[in-house]
Amino acid sequence: MFQASAGTSPGEASSQFVTKTKGTVVEKKSITVNGSPAQRLITDIASEQGTIRVLSYFIKKNKNIFVFHGYSAQTGFPQYQPLFETTMRQFKRLTDARKINVKPDRVRVKKVTRAGSLKNVLLALKVPNDQLEPTALLNGMHLTDRVPANTLVKIIEKGR
């Protein structure tokens, strides 16, 4: 689980987490993750299904505290801990322009120029075959429904 947290430091954020969850601290350590100050915390937290063990990283980046939690039953925790640790230690500044400059998909409204089945209308609007059913659902219709000319339909325009 990933979230942002209140608090001015990783240590303060981890203390707030322990207080809020009424957890029992098993291990607490100040560390650095890719140059950012962090707090590594292992806690045991009571739940309705029994006690769960939680590995948490509270990482300060600029003015924010980013929080990662990995949890499992106490008995299974040693099996998952290496995966949790590897994932949480990967946190770093994103520099790949292809990932930073992503454009979102957008819903566009298009006018139908020629009457036909919704499937044929969508194909004429260049909707990919694998997106026909979801687009029909987006329009509250079935692919076999008849669509009159000059009807407005919604399609998804892919970002990048």
Image: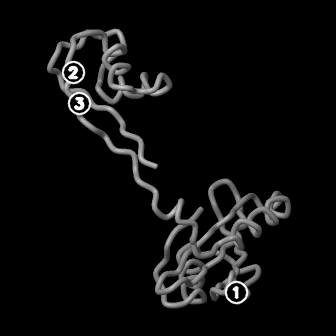
Counting residues from the N terminus, which is met first, the one under dot 2 or under dot 1? 1
Q: Residues within 10 Å of mark 1 (few under 14, many from 20)?
A: some
Task: Check whether the beta carbons of the residues at disc 2 and disc 3 lie within 8 A of each other.
Answer: yes
Of tags 3 and 1, the one toward the viewer is 3
Q: Which residue is mark 2?
A: 112
**Residue type at tag 3:** Lys
Using the numbered discs, state the Cα–Cα distance from disc 3 to disc 1 in whole angstroms. Answer: 52 Å
Return the residue nearer the eye: 38 or 126.
Answer: 126
Image position, residue 115 (x, y; %): 22, 11
Query: Is the N terminus in the top left, top right, bottom left or bottom right quadrant?
Result: bottom right
Q: Is residue 65 above or below residue 156?
A: below
Of tags 2 and 1, the one toward the viewer is 2
Q: Which residue is mark 3?
A: 110
Task: Check whether the beta carbons of the residues at disc 3 and disc 1 lie within 8 A of each other.
Answer: no
For residue 48, side relative to residue 63 (left or right): right
**Residue 129's mark?**
none
Q: Is residue 47 above or below residue 117?
A: below
Q: Which residue is mark 1?
A: 32
| Secondary structure of the residue carrying numbered label 1 | strand
Using the numbered discs, state the Cα–Cα distance from disc 2 to disc 3 in whole angstroms. Answer: 6 Å
Instruction: Determine the residue positioned at 53% across, 60% down.
Output: 99
